[in-house]
């Protein structure tokens, strides 16, 4: 399953209602988002992502915190093979 998200927090809230257990590739463009919101999204989609592509346009400095990314990936994306951050 492939899902490309290019929108606002409303779409993320809608997606949180869906379990995406077969999702393998996710491309998401975040505008003015907070890392905490993105982290909640990743935790709640229950997917087996192999590829994650994230484009960020946000002033939230937590997006550049390597330790937070590492923890998120290790805890919630153990099957991740490729990670792209722009």
Image: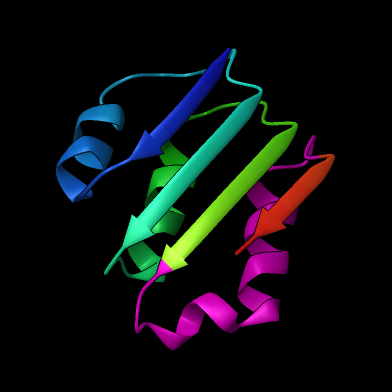
The image shows residue 79, relative to residue 30, as above or below, that is above
Left-right relation of 3 to 79: left
Q: Which scheme is used to colour this image of the protein? A: rainbow
Magenta span contains residue 60: yes
Task: Point out residue 84 in the picture as x, y percentages from the top left corner.
Answer: 70, 54
Name the image quarter holding residue 36. bottom left
Give 11 or 73, whichever is nearer the viewer.
11
Residue depicted at x 68% and y 52%:
75
The image shows residue 68, relative to residue 6, as above or below, that is below
The image shows residue 18, relative to residue 62, as above or below, that is above
Split into 4 quadrants, where in the image is the C terminus?
A: bottom right
Left-right relation of 15 to 27: left
Residue depicted at x 26% and y 44%:
7
Task: Point out residue 56 in the picture as x, y percentages from the top left corner.
Answer: 45, 65
Name the image quarter holding residue 44. top left
Residue depicted at x 61% and y 83%:
65
Task: Point out residue 15 in the picture as x, y percentages from the top left corner.
Answer: 29, 29
Split into 4 quadrants, where in the image is the N terminus?
A: top right
The kind of secondary structure the magenta stretch mainly shows is: helix
Q: Residue furthest left?
A: 10
- Figure disc tally: 0
Left-right relation of 42 to 11: right
Residue depicted at x 46% and y 30%:
4
Task: Point out residue 30 in the picture as x, y percentages from the top left corner.
Answer: 37, 57
Name the image quarter holding residue 26. top right
Magenta span contains residue 49: no
Span highlighted in magenta in the image: 57-80
């Amino acid at each position: 399953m492939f899902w490309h998200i290019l929108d606002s927090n409303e779409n993320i809230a809608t997606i949180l209602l869906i379990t995406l257990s077969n999702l393998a590739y996710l491309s998401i463009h975040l505008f003015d988002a907070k890392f905490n919101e993105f982290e909640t999204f990743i935790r709640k989609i229950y997917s087996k992502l192999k590829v994650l592509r994230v484009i960020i346009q946000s002033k939230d400095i937590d997006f550049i915190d390597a330790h937070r990314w590492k923890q998120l990936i290790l805890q919630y994306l153990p099957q991740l093979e490729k990670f792209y951050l722009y």
